[in-house]
Image (spheres, rainbow, N blue to C red):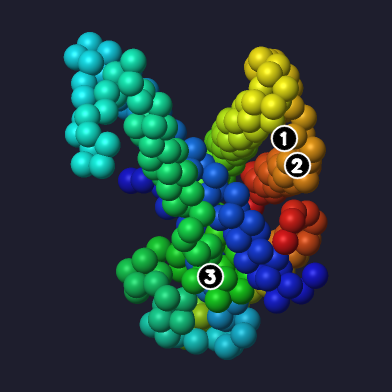
Amino acid sequence: MDEKEAVEKMRDLRKSLETTLRYEKSGSKFPQVFMVTLFAVLAANLVSLASNLYDLKTLNPAMGYIQIGSNGVGIGIPVLILFGVAALLVYRILHKPFTKPVENSWDEYLKEGIIGIIRIIEESDWEGILLSLKKAKQAFIMISSLTILLELGIIFVILFFAYGILVTGIFGIPIDLYVVLLGSVLLIVALGDRTIKQSYIELWHMDNLVAELRWFYFEFQGAGI
Amino acid sequence: MQEFKPDLYVVARVIKNLIEKGPMNKTRLAGASEISYDKFLLYFDWMCLKNLIKEENGTVSVMEEGIRTYNLLVDWILKHVGKLMFRR
């Protein structure tokens, strides 16, 4: 390997690190996500409580008074909209770190070639980078799980209505929630097979990156330079 | 007094300049090494003490030990960066 190749490899290493560390940035937003979710649940409960307590009515110009309490149109639609808005907010919060272009903070140093590489090795907080990678991996698992749960929820709702219209509506068989849930899980596994595989490969790459950096860091420490 | 801890990349930069551009005076070498003259003097004393560089008639030049150390460092970097495996 010559100097030019080494510089290119270090540039790629930083790019790979920056890309992976986006998950850590996304993971650092989990408290915000928790607050949004908590707010949505509380708001939904408040709407439900208020409509039931006061038996509220709303004026619709076309249809006259519509009861929105438990005996009327119901609170399903407002709550669904509320959770829809919450889901959109959560998506925006978690997705934000991935919308920015990948920057390479080592570029300035790498202009100096091998001296720049020495500077990077010497000045980088390797322990900090390794810790951030560990957090990125945890955040990645969390985000992947949330995504799968969200997909499961959407498919469950779609299947629930489809089942209701087709099986219950036509044949008069009552809805079996276990069947709907099982169907949703099977659909997730079938449709998300590629995503699950990709997630596994991504995790493997993250582990590999941590192992390589740890080795590099210990070699540098042990070299007694 | 606190012990002087040199930055490795500055030491390497000083030696590289002397190898590539040849012997030169301290002011020019400090400029080429991109450090202030005051700071350079600290490095200069430390590197002279370690027999990496020497000064003769106001001109600084690199010693055999300096070239050997620099080459060792470069070899270490190239060898270990070359062994790094990750997704590109």
Q: Which residue is mark 2?
A: A191
Q: Amino acid at mark 2?
A: Leu
Instruction: Name which of mark 1 and mark 3 comes first in the sequence.
Output: 3
Q: Secondary structure at mark 1?
A: helix
Q: Which mark is residue A177?
A: none
Residue A1 higher or lower than A87, as above or below: below
Residue A155 higher or lower than A169, as above or below: below
Q: Which residue is mark 3?
A: A107
Name the mark nearer the viewer: 3 or 2.
2
Residue A119 higher or lower than A90, as above or below: below
Both marks 3 and 2 on one chain = yes
Residue pictured at 55% horizontal, 59% vertical = A120
Give the x, y percent position of residue B25. 45, 85
Name the residue nearer the viewer: A41 or A47.
Answer: A47
Q: Secondary structure at mark 2?
A: helix
Name the mark nearer the viewer: 1 or 3.
1
Q: Secondary structure at mark 3?
A: helix
Question: Pointer 2 indicates a residue of which chain?
Answer: A
Q: Quadrant of residue B50?
A: bottom right
Q: Is residue B82 left or right of residue B58?
A: right
Give the x, y percent position of residue A35. 35, 29
What quarter of the picture does the C terminus of chain B occupy? bottom right
Query: Dot 2: within a 10 Å radius of its alpha carbon, few (fewer than 14), some, or many (20 or more) residues?
Result: few
Q: Is residue A154 left or right of residue B29?
A: right
Residue pictured at 42% horizontal, 85% vertical = B28
Q: Amino acid at mark 1?
A: Ile
Question: Pointer 1 indicates a residue of which chain?
Answer: A
Residue pictured at 23% horizontal, 37% vertical = A60
Real-space Cα separation, disc 1 to disc 2, in angstroms: 5 Å
Q: Which residue is mark 1?
A: A188
Please indicate, yes or no, whether residue A68 appears anywhere in the rendered image.
yes
